[in-house]
Image (cartoon, rainbow, N blue to C red):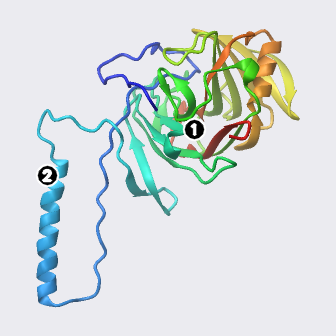
Amino acid sequence: MNGRWAAANETPEGSRRRVGRHRRPGRRASTPASMVTPRHGRRTSRRADALRAIGGGLALVALAVVTGLPQGAAADPRPAPIAVTSHDGPERAEERKVCEKFGSTPVAGGRYEVQNSLWGASTSQCIVAFDGPSAGPTGASAAFRVEAKHRNDSGPASYPSIVYGCNYGNCTKGTPFPRPISDLGDLRSSWTVETPASGDYNVAYDIWLDPTARKDGRPTGLELMIWLKHTDRVQPIGDKVGTTTLDGVGYDVWLGKADLPTISYVRQQQTTEVKDLNITTFVADAQKRGQAKQGWYLTSIQAGFEPWIGGDGLETTSYSVTRNGQ
């Protein structure tokens, strides 16, 4: 993302807790590069062994120089790519682990930003972000998994998620947002997740609307959520006000308000995967209900999890957004 991330000792704007909703990120977290140990080949001559030992010693010295920054020296604020072994076996290149509360990292060439957004709990949380598989006409998708063991009884601990658009002064590469809702075009998203057998959480889009073409600060218009899945005791903010069918799928509609109005579309048949979800139809429905106003702008489309209990096992395996096929 472009723009400045808040310093570690700054208090994020609008950081007061709102039960059930998503919070803002802070600055990017830095991650040390991993060490790769070369495989040993077959036995060689003593001279070759000696040369290899000398080379190994020099490599250790070089590593100490690189990683041993003197006290007070500034570290690169961007997370360095690391090669690690994922939880299910195969090695993924360019993984980045972010544990800072409001840290984030770009993926898919900067088209998306994955954010930790640990706003509602004192328990620790990390995200491991990486490029997803090739998806649709853009060939780019984002992915991440959550590492956390939360224990909130009364509300979300966090909103680890992927951002496409502008969020608190930072815009993803090539984003078409902010854009008037009258000119959204054919706005589509595909999203696939994996969820654990235990814990409390929801799987939800978080779409932000503002009366102005806002790129910085918190949106002031409407928060529009699309819930794909949730555990039994996790419910949207506010009250259920009706039902609707969009693109052949039934949703319960909830309205509520914390620091700004929120409309939530809760899928009646829960799922862990959507293909070419038509975001424009949800914005249009919110307009018909008087929640989104003519002349407003869509500033970002985000997708993630709101864990209450647990968190381990929540994973986005692929997420992408297109406008008019781009």
In the rendered image, residue 223, in percent from the top left (x then y), is placed at 64, 18
Seen at 49% across and 14% down, the residue is 217
Seen at 65% across and 31% down, the residue is 204
Q: Are marks 1 and 2 in contact (CB under 8 Å)?
A: no
Q: Which quadrant is home to the C terminus?
A: top right
Near mark 2 (Cα within 10 A), the count class, few <14, some 14-19 or many ≥20, is few
Kind of residue at disc 2: Val
Q: Closer to us: mark 1 or mark 2?
A: 2
Question: Mark 2 sits on what residue?
Answer: 65
- For marks 1 and 2, the one nearer the N-term is 2
In the rendered image, residue 261, in percent from the top left (x then y), is placed at 66, 10
Q: Is residue 292 above or below residue 229?
A: above
Q: Is residue 160 left or right of residue 78?
A: right
Q: Nearer the viewer, residue 231 or 91?
A: 91
Question: Mark 1 sits on what residue?
Answer: 199
Kind of residue at disc 1: Gly
Q: Is residue 222 left or right of residue 270?
A: left
Q: Is residue 192 above or below residue 288?
A: below
In the rendered image, residue 94, in percent from the top left (x then y), is placed at 43, 52
Near mark 1 (Cα within 10 A), the count class, few <14, some 14-19 or many ≥20, is some
Residue 262, image quadrant: top right
Seen at 35% across and 46% down, the residue is 80
Secondary element at tag 1: loop
